[in-house]
Image (cartoon, grey):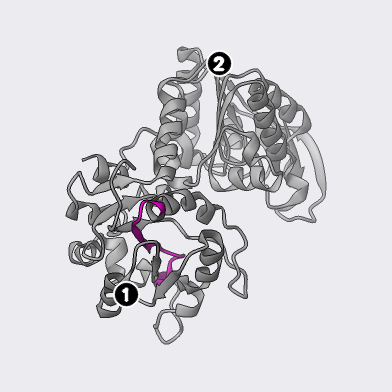
């Protein structure tokens, strides 16, 4: 962000894909708050800001007549909230290209903000259409990408638009800079011992991440439904737990790779099990490799939670991606809560702790621990791919 924004129009890609209730009120403004420092910096330098974002996937949820449900997916619902946060004039235009958008952008004065309509109202956005990106680029003098959550998508407003600005007129926002800096710190120069915690439902979603962890982790803790594929691969009994039977070989191969690399893999020794996938299920605790038929593992058990927490608290670097159980159901949320509290405890002792992934972030937010860990990533899929070692299109487009 070392560019001169004075009297310049900054075209800023933000991630304002925030949850809204039935009355279109924002229920979690984490992503908006994360972008405020970048916007304020540009305004304080005497620039103006043109904001681009998507909200949901409107083209996949059309009305019965095939039209876009504009009321559900319009960004105009965010305008009042933005005005309160920024304490400045925030204009809105119900398009992101076209005559109205061009006129509003041209009239924008230093210190003012213009919010463009949802970029995903156009199919060209997700297709990465060159002409669409060119029209967006024409609205501003400088391009700023501050949307880490979409950096893994080669969309028009996140990646292609950057091609129309030279290296002196495009940059990362503060949020993107922090995301890249913290993820790189965790991967490239971590203080030992390093503990990587992963959860979620499928081994297939996380196997690349797990294998990347082998490059720098001392401990890998595996929770969530994906753990039962590993137990089944080790000839355990997992009852009705969710497993990927076609991934048993991959699971076995990973455990061998970890052993050969000298990396300790902790699987949950016990599980909180339900007789059905429901908040009102009957609940029992069983050893994770001895779950009876008719029961399914839906959270790590109390003994597993203690061992996971102990490993985390002894670490100097912790990376956590994915819940330990069905966190949205209170009866199966304890494992995720214990991990969240252990991360906060490790941070107090001087560890660097990074949390990424929707349910992991939800857990630290609900427990009011977001400020008690070192860094909370705003990008679920983007952080996952970055940690896997992939080059993200949105980052490459700025770095060249």
* Image spot of residue 303 (x, y percent): 77, 27
x and y percent of residue 393 in the render?
A: 29, 46
Q: 132 or 250: which is nearer to us? A: 132
**Residue 305 position in % (x across, y down):** 72, 30
Magenta-colored stretch includes residue 83: no
The structure residue drawn at horizontal position 59% and vertical position 65%, both measured from the top left corner, is 26
Q: Earlier in the sequence, mark 1 or mark 2?
A: 1
Q: Secondary structure at mark 2?
A: loop
Q: Is residue 193 visible?
A: yes
Residue placed at 38% from the left, 52% from the top? Answer: 42
Would you say 221 lies left or right of 10 here? right
Dot 2 corresponds to which residue? 193
In the image shown, does 158 or 172 lie closer to the viewer? 172
Q: What is the residue that sits farthest to the bottom in this orientation?
A: 65
Q: Is residue 226 above or below residue 88?
A: above
The magenta segment is 44-60
- The local crowd at label 1, few if under 14, some if 14 to 19, many if 20 or more residues have their Cα within 10 Å, is some
Evaluate whether residue 233 shows in this view: no
Provide the residue designation for mark 1: 104
Q: Secondary structure at mark 1?
A: helix
Q: Nearer the viewer, residue 360 or 60?
A: 360
Q: Residue at x 36, y 60 (%)?
A: 49
The quarter of the rendered structure image containing the N terminus is top left
**Quadrant that contains the C terminus:** top left
Q: Distance of mark 1 from mark 2, alpha carbons? A: 53 Å
């Amino acid at each position: 962000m070392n560019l001169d924004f004075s009297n310049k129009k900054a075209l800023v890609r933000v991630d304002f894909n925030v949850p809204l209730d039935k009355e279109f009120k924002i229920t979690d403004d984490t992503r908006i708050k994360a972008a405020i420092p970048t916007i304020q910096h540009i305004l304080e330098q005497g620039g103006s800001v043109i904001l681009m974002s998507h909200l949901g996937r409107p083209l996949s949820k059309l009305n019965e007549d095939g039209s876009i449900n504009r009321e559900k997916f319009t960004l105009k619902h965010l305008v009042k909230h933005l005005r309160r946060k920024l304490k400045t004039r925030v204009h809105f235009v119900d398009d992101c290209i076209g005559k109205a958008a061009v006129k509003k952008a041209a009239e924008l004065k230093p210190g003012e903000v213009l919010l463009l309509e949802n970029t995903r109202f156009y199919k060209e956005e997700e297709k990465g259409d060159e002409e669409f990106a060119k029209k967006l680029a024409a609205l501003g003098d400088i391009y700023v990408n501050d949307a880490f959550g979409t950096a893994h998508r080669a969309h028009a407003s996140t990646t292609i638009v950057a091609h129309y600005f030279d290296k002196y007129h495009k940059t990362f926002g503060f949020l993107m800079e922090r995301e890249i800096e913290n993820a790189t710190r965790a991967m490239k120069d971590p203080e030992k011992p390093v503990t990587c915690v992963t959860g979620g439902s499928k081994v297939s979603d996380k196997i690349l991440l797990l294998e990347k962890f082998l490059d720098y982790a001392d401990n890998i803790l595996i929770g969530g439904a994906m753990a039962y594929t590993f137990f089944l691969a080790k000839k355990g009994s997992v009852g009705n737990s969710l497993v990927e039977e076609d991934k048993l070989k991959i699971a076995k191969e990973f455990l061998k790779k970890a052993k050969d690399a000298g990396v300790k893999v902790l699987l949950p020794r016990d599980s909180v099990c339900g007789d059905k996938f429901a908040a009102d299920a009957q609940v029992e605790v069983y050893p994770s490799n001895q779950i009876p038929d008719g029961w399914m593992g839906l959270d790590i058990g109390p003994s597993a939670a203690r061992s996971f927490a102990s490993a985390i608290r002894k670490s100097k670097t912790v990376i956590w991606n994915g819940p330990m159980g069905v966190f949205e159901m209170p009866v199966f949320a304890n494992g995720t809560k214990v991990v969240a509290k252990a991360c906060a405890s490790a941070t107090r002792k001087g560890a660097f702790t990074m949390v990424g992934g929707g349910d992991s972030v939800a857990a630290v937010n609900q427990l009011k621990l977001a400020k008690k860990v070192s860094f909370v990533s705003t990008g679920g899929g983007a952080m996952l791919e970055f940690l896997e070692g992939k080059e993200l299109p949105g980052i490459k487009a700025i770095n060249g």
